[in-house]
Image (spheres, coloured by chain):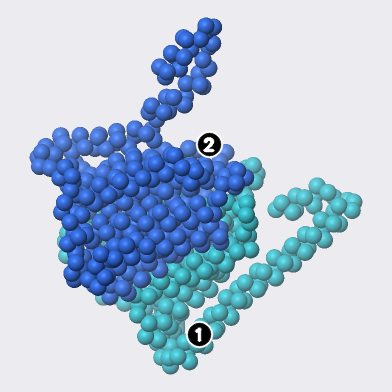
Amino acid sequence: MSKIDNETTKTAVPVPVPARAKLPSVKRIGGWHAIGPIVIFLAILLVVALLTPAFIGGGGLAIIASSSAPILLLALGQAMVLNIGSIDLSNAAIGLLGAILLALTLGPVAGLSPLIVLLATTAFGAVNGLILAYAQVPSFALTLGTLGIFQAVALVASGRTTVYVSSNGEGVHSLYESGIANVPMTFWMGVLLAVALWVLLRYTRVGRGMTAIGKNESAAIFSAVRTRSLKVLAFALSGFAAGLAGIAIIAQAGSASPTGLGSDLLLPAIAAALIGGTSISGGVVNPLTVIFGALTVALVPIATTAVGIDAQAQSLVYGAVIIGVVALTMSRNKSSIVK
Amino acid sequence: MVNKVLSEQGAGGITTTAIRIRESGIERRARFRSLAEPLSLLVALAVLIGVFSLLNERFLTASNVQNILTQSAIPLIVAVGATLVILLGSIDLSVEGVMGATGMTWILLSANSRGGVDLGPWAWVIALGVALLLGVASGLIFTALKVPSFIVTLGMWYVGLGIATMLYGTDLLPRLEDEGLKGWTSRISLGLPNSFWVALLVIGLGILVLRSTRIGRVTLAIGNSETIVRSAGLPAFRVKVAVFAIAAVLSGLGGILATVQLDIGSPTVGSGVLFIVIPAVVIGGTHLSGGKGGILRTVLGVFLLTILNNGLILSGVESSYQSAVTGAILVAAIVFAAWSQRDRLRVAK
């Protein structure tokens, strides 16, 4: 705002600044999508700190950060897909399948295993994207179908039991054991991915193209944006992020099972992406604020117990939060038709 | 509707004749499709039944047929509601959550091993009331706040699960105590399992609602073009809320029957139902974009999937593969349905 004021005073003839011209700069400084996620996180943190001071003193923040790592990774992938106006209901299932594959292969192939897992999960995501882009089917129905397939593959691959890492687990496990500022590397992995995605979205042709698809797909097609390959890429990135989440799960738990850690991350991850300022209708995303979205989601169980709500109500809270956040941030007008 | 308006406008003259010829062509093709599509489903069903009865002699025994009918009853009831929602062009992902919340409410208010109150028939009323509330909430958030239905119902799915988990608490498993109700769903009356009779009743009512009531007709119209519905002054808002409410109550009914069948209360009593219901509606040929389709087609879709699952298990395929089979069928069905409409400029989210 001040910048514009300075510019207007410099000119010899004071040109009245139209009210509308101020809008972009106000948005650049603040705006819900930029600061909202941080404000929400700090507000909830404040409530928790006031109700249970011991939690913050006892390294609670580090605990939140470490437990938010898989959610953050999945949420970043989900945010990339939401950014093109689609949704990926299968990414949590891909992440869990990645974790199971990692637990199965770490013994036999050791160091190559994480690489294989990342390649596989990226390919799974790319398949979603290929079907979506070339058959032009609705993403929620498509990924609901592939969710079923990935779940079944996870069940079969694990034999319906918990798969433990037989050997060579030290390398992956150290991602959780070692860390910077008491926060495990798995979380910093998420932060790194967020920064990379932020650069991709902000400074590259590919990233701008993706956002263009989310804002107005028809216009993107007419502007010669390669919509199909970018859609495939967005879903492939979601698969890649899910693979990283799988690695984070193994690093934390040392084992994976179809019903264990990570089996219930679909909704928390969507919630994290949405609280992080991602628009459900596409075109608005900031991977850096998604970090705060994930931290907020990881804080929810602690906050609910601090406020005195039963810990079992967690899924209710997640569900309500998703509906609430979308209802609050949706851009809508009276005549538009929502299906 | 649009065609009718067009022909009335051009009354008299050559244009009318041309339009009429075109119209009758469209009508003939539509009639052919409406016959051919269910027919191909029936053929697929017949092939499946043929293959499975050759593979396993137990498949066509009376007890297995009754089994299949019992297994299909709950998905059928839920699918009637899901068909109505999809005819709007929307989607209801909340079925499993609503089933859990309703089933849990019902068993805790009926005679169960935890003791507590036994409200008898009032347990049904209150439990279905819970479902109705969830449905109306979904419908209102969807229509009044304009939140896309897949997000509302995705959220409501987990809200329902949360309610069920909270009701379940940390106590012992609530087990059904009423001897008359135990196994009621699979008991046979007049040759068919009880739960299947309920399903038939629901299907009948569903068809009646869709064909001969204002709610049903407006539902189809909204799926075709909501803009026209609104400019015609039809109550799009109320009908959408009503359809979500009906769908939730039917999910709730399915949840109660599933609880009776399981004999115990569980928040995840509905798990897997969504995976049969949505693919069944799509295979039946109801368009995900709304406006085209029907309940009888969905019935065929449910049978196809139930028979496929039942036959695969009888043939020794592990039950772990079930969700993969239905998932793959869902993907194949939506790809098949969308294939003819592919266009470089089409926008599919």
Q: Position of residue A98 (x, y in %)?
A: 32, 63
What secondary structure is found at the residue carrying circle 1?
A: helix
Give the number of the disc on residue A143.
none
Q: Chain of mark 1?
A: B
Give the number of the disc on residue B49.
1
The answer to whether residue A166 shows anywhere in this view is yes
Answer above or below: position of B228 versus A100. Answer: above
Q: Position of residue B131 (x, y in %)?
A: 37, 56
Q: Position of residue A231 (x, y in %)?
A: 49, 53
Q: Chain of mark 2?
A: A
Tell me which chain appears cyan.
B
Crowding near the residue tagged with mark 1, few <14, some 14–19, many ≥20 C-alpha atoms within 10 Å: some
Q: Quarter of the image holding residue A203?
A: top left
Residue type at the position of mark 2 = Asn
Horizontally, is B158 left or right of B214 in the view? left
Residue extending farthest right:
B13
- Seen from the viewer's position, the closer of residues B178 and B338 is B338
Discs 1 and 2 share one subunit: no
- Seen from the viewer's position, the closer of residues B127 and A180 is A180
Residue type at the position of mark 1 = Ile
Answer above or below: position of B74 versus B146. Answer: below
- Seen from the viewer's position, the closer of residues B293 and A114 is A114
How many numbered circles are shown? 2
Give the number of the disc on residue A333.
2
Residue extending farthest top:
A12
How far is mark 1 from mark 2, CA to CA? 51 Å
